[in-house]
Image (cartoon, helix red, strand yellow):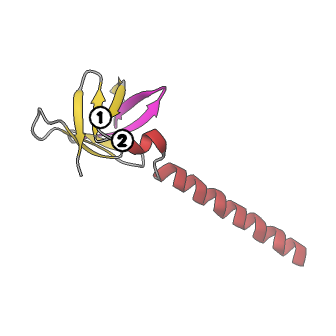
Amino acid sequence: MNMKRHTVLLIGIIVVIVIVVFLIARYVPFGERAKFVGTWYQPEFYGRAMTFYSDGSCSDFGWPGTWEIRDGKLIITAMDGTSIARWNYSFSDNGRELTLSGRGTWIKWG
């Protein structure tokens, strides 16, 4: 009985650890992905902003969607799933400037 109780406790601890690791990986950006998180403004166009959230959601000039980095490209998908945009990207000025192919340069706020 005591051994069975310890086994159940050990399995419970392992399950909790796996869940915590999954949540951290899902909501805490790492590496290249972390560079995108935040709000970006386009200096040429007053009020034009994109916000990337660590959970993979985004807002592009007020339009909600999701974003991901896949095969070296930034991919933004509209919430209705009908519109998908893919851009090559590069960072400069220590990660404070983001250049998207075809969409110009964006400046990180803050």
Q: Are marks 2 and 1 in contact (CB under 8 Å)?
A: yes
Q: Between disc 2 and disc 1, whose residue precedes?
A: 2
Q: Would residue 82 be seen by someone viewing this image from the given angle? A: no
- Residue type marked 2: Phe
Q: Would residue 20 be seen by someone viewing this image from the given angle? A: yes
Quick check: is 70 in the magenta stretch?
Answer: yes
Compared to residue 106, the image places residue 39 above or below, namely below
- Residue type marked 1: Leu
Outermost bottom residue: 2
Outermost front residue: 93
Q: Residues within 10 Å of mark 1 (few under 14, many from 20)?
A: many
Compared to residue 37, the image places residue 79 above or below, namely above
The answer to whether residue 40 is left or right of residue 56 is: left
Q: Which residues are magenta?
A: 63-79
> Residue 87: percent from the left, percent from the top?
35, 25
At x 29% / y 38%, what residue is drawn? 93
Residue 40 quadrant: top left
The answer to whether residue 57 is left or right of residue 11 is: left
Q: Is the N terminus in the top left, top right, bottom left or bottom right quadrant? A: bottom right
What residue sits right under mark 1 in the picture?
A: 98
> Residue 68: percent from the left, percent from the top?
43, 36
Q: Secondary structure at mark 2?
A: helix
Query: Mark on residue 36?
Result: 2
At x 53% / y 55%, what residue is drawn? 24
